[in-house]
Amino acid sequence: MSDIDFILVEKRQRQTSAGTVALSERELAFLRLACSEKTYFAIAREMYVSERTVDGYRDALFRKLNVVSRVGLVMYAVKNGIVRV
């Protein structure tokens, strides 16, 4: 393992242990849109990406946030101040 790999692993462990999860700007944009009544198709069009890319964002967030549904994504976003009700 190189020094860079070690730093990245160490950073990831600190983020996980602190209870925070690092999300990319695109993942945050998707998460905000997923908290609306828009379909995944409509979200893809608004983000100028394919539906498969939106599926990738969704699946990545499911793994990162340890949730299994869109409702779980919304609950995470509300609890963490990403969106307001």
Image (cartoon, rainbow, N blue to C red):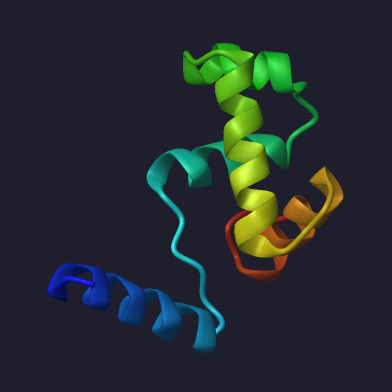
- Vertically, is 76 above or below 32? below
Query: x%, y% of residue 28?
Result: 50, 47
Query: x%, y% of residue 39?
Result: 77, 21
Query: x%, y% of residue 41?
Result: 70, 14
Query: x%, y% of residue 30?
Result: 57, 37
Q: How many marks?
A: 0
The residue at the point 23 percent across, 77 percent down is 7
- Vertically, is 54 above or below 5? above
Pick the residue in front: 67 or 42: 67
Residue that extends furthest to the front in the rendered view of this protein = 1
The residue at the point 70 percent across, 37 percent down is 34
- Vertically, is 69 above or below 7? above
Pick the residue in front: 85 or 59: 59
Q: Is residue 18 left or right of residue 62?
A: left
- Image quadrant for the N terminus? bottom left
Q: Is residue 50 left or right of residue 38?
A: left
- Vertically, is 64 above or below 21? above
- Image quadrant for the C terminus? bottom right
Residue that extends furthest to the left in the rendered view of this protein = 3
The residue at the point 78 percent across, 60 percent down is 75
Q: Is residue 15 left or right of residue 72?
A: left
The residue at the point 70 percent across, 52 percent down is 62
